[in-house]
Image (cartoon, rainbow, N blue to C red):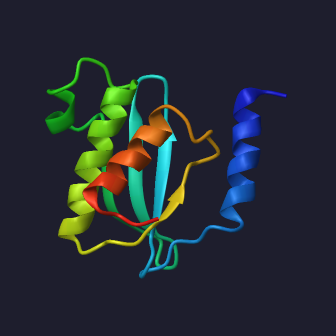
Amino acid sequence: MDKRVSRKRRHYRVRKKIVGTPERPRVNVYRSLNNIYVQIIDDLSGHTLVSASTLEPAIRETLKYGGNKEAARKVGEILGERALEKGIKDVVFDRGGYKYHGRVKEVAEALREKGLNF
């Protein structure tokens, strides 16, 4: 079975159980080879509340490459700051079918350091 297909299956299985509400929105992580994208989503209304990625000019200028742990940590820190500005403290973490390892783990740890609870 293809690696991408396996990830999608894991993601669908996890998404059956995880739902972002206005009180506890969902933190969604997507990673490509060259970039990482993180969003905080309210699934009930279908709105993205906060987002950050390595494609943003503010982040891109400080990094040499957007697909490593350093970039993932930076994106997590910026997303954590933006979430706190909007008053979001409690979230549900959706790893997107990826293993909780490497870049996904760095994002989660950076969010916890900034004060988000999940």
Residue furthest to the top: 64
Quarter of the figure with the N terminus: top right
The answer to whether 4 is drawn above or below residue 33 in the figure is: below
* Residue 95 coordinates in the image, percent (x, y): 56, 49
Residue furthest to the front: 113
Residue 99 seen in the current view: yes
Q: Quadrant of residue 55?
A: top left
Q: Quadrant of residue 89?
A: bottom left
Q: Nearer the viewer, residue 28 or 104?
A: 104
Name which residue lies at 52% across and 79% down.
44
> What number of labels is visible?
0
Q: Nearer the viewer, residue 71 or 112?
A: 112
* Residue 8 coordinates in the image, percent (x, y): 70, 44
Residue furthest to the right: 1
Name which residue lies at 24% across and 17% down.
64
Please indicate whether residue 3 sits to the left or right of residue 59 in the image.
right
Residue 53 seen in the current view: no
The answer to whether 39 is drawn above or below residue 1 in the figure is: below
Q: Nearer the viewer, residue 106 or 56?
A: 106
Please indicate whether residue 9 sits to the left or right of residue 117 in the image.
right
* Residue 91 coordinates in the image, percent (x, y): 44, 68
Please indicate whether residue 40 sits to the left or right of residue 54 in the image.
right
* Residue 29 coordinates in the image, percent (x, y): 48, 47
Name which residue lies at 51% across and 72% down.
20
Name which residue lies at 40% across and 24% down.
67
